[in-house]
Amino acid sequence: MSPVKSVLMLSQTFHPVIGGAEKQALEISRALAERGVRVTALTRRPAGLPERETLDGVEIVRLSCPGSGALNSAAFMLKSFFWMLANRASYEAVHVHLASSPAVAAILAGRLTGRRVVVKLGGGRGVDEITLSRRTFPGRLKLAFFRLAGPELLVMNSEVYSWLKSEPEYAALKLRQFRNGVDTGRYTPPLYNEKINAKAAVGLENSTTFLFVGRLSPEKRVKEFVEAWAEIFSERTVPPKIHLLIVGGGPEGPALEAAVKDLGLEGRVTLAGPKDDLRPYYRAADVFILPSISEGLSNSMLEAMACGVAVMASRVGGAKEAVTDGASGLLFDPLNRVELKECVGRFIEDRALPLRMGELARKTAVERYSMARVADELLEIYGGGR
């Protein structure tokens, strides 16, 4: 088996669009480019962005697509299909980020060109792309095509993997349990004085800082976490020295702002909005929180772990695989508020606990989730190995 020397990354959206899938696609592309692989990212062209540019050795090709919604998606699917046929000499394998309509184009093009195609399946159990696709007619058509074509799917957590393996309906799919990766050279733990300075830089005192980074959407249950946060203060005679920092944007943003105000949490909760560079926030944090009711494998959680931040996460999806409960973090039932508050209480009572757990979180990130290792394994997969 000769090593793959050129890879096409196919994604409906790509850098500088902010999102978990987009970020992972960019990080994988960078890691492969550093290994001398020719990487091309094929994506849609948002207004104001050039048709082509090169970023960190990755060539980004953006296709202009008319309209919006379904029309725009259909246009991108068709354009990307014909682009892959016309430019077959420029890539040996295709990595499709998310099993949306472009995956159909890639699989068809792969059959015609003989190029290997792998598709990353996004989302946790219940909000995974297979479940969501079942709810619409175009989605059901796509699933029917998948059952016929039998594509290779990279599944990011064991819950979704086990469910799909047990469904006779999807027996034709070639499932491979995989994981996201993190650049453990870029995301590193700060020294003690650097952490103090990082807290000051984002306007925090030297209190135990709990951090959420991600999209503010209902399944993340950030609003419910804020409500529990208010209860923690109301139930204690002496206010604990803790602060909640929320970084991100999304549909739940206005409701969160209202909740912080209504619950009297100004000064105890900071809504920082979306940020391009998250490292200052990871460096300021002591505990990363992930209260989602469903989750694939959070990029932000892995970045926080690489920065030596302890994790407090729902016992779902990739978190329960990445976090060793009681060692590198604490896991809880997302629907059990008492259990959630008990986890926060452990960090309040033992201020050295985040440091001890953060060291083990960093060790896990390096040993199991480093982007260097993930990139090497992907190259084997692209070449038909593993």
Image: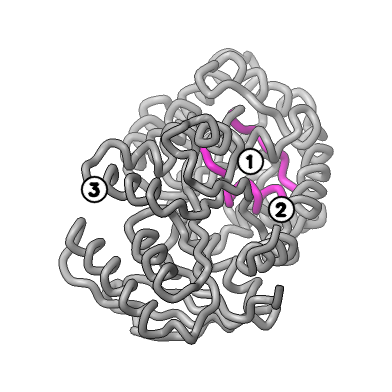
Please tell me whether residue 318 is drawn above or below residue 337 in the rendered image. below
- Which numbered marker is on residue 369? 2
Q: Amino acid at mark 1?
A: Phe
- Dot 1 or dot 3, earlier in sequence: 3
- Residue depicted at 33% across the width and 72% down the height: 81
* Rendered location of residue 227, percent (x, y): 46, 24
* Rendered location of residue 226, percent (x, y): 48, 29
- Residue depicted at 74% across the width and 29% down the height: 325
Please tell me whether residue 306 is drawn above or below residue 116 in the rendered image. above
Please tell me whether residue 53 is drawn above or below residue 301 in the rendered image. below
User: In which quadrant of the rendered image does the N terminus lie?
Assistant: bottom right
- Residue depicted at 23% across the width and 48% down the height: 138
What are the residue bounds of the magenta stretch?
A: 295-314
- 170 vs 305, left or right, is left
Q: Report if residue 43 is visible in the image.
A: yes
Q: How many marks?
A: 3
Q: Which residue is mark 3?
A: 138
Q: Which residue is mark 1?
A: 288
- Dot 2 or dot 3, earlier in sequence: 3
Q: Is residue 218 magenta?
A: no
Q: Report if residue 207 is visible in the image.
A: no
Q: Secondary structure at mark 3?
A: helix
Please tell me whether residue 100 is drawn above or below residue 15 in the rendered image. above
Q: Amino acid at mark 2?
A: Tyr
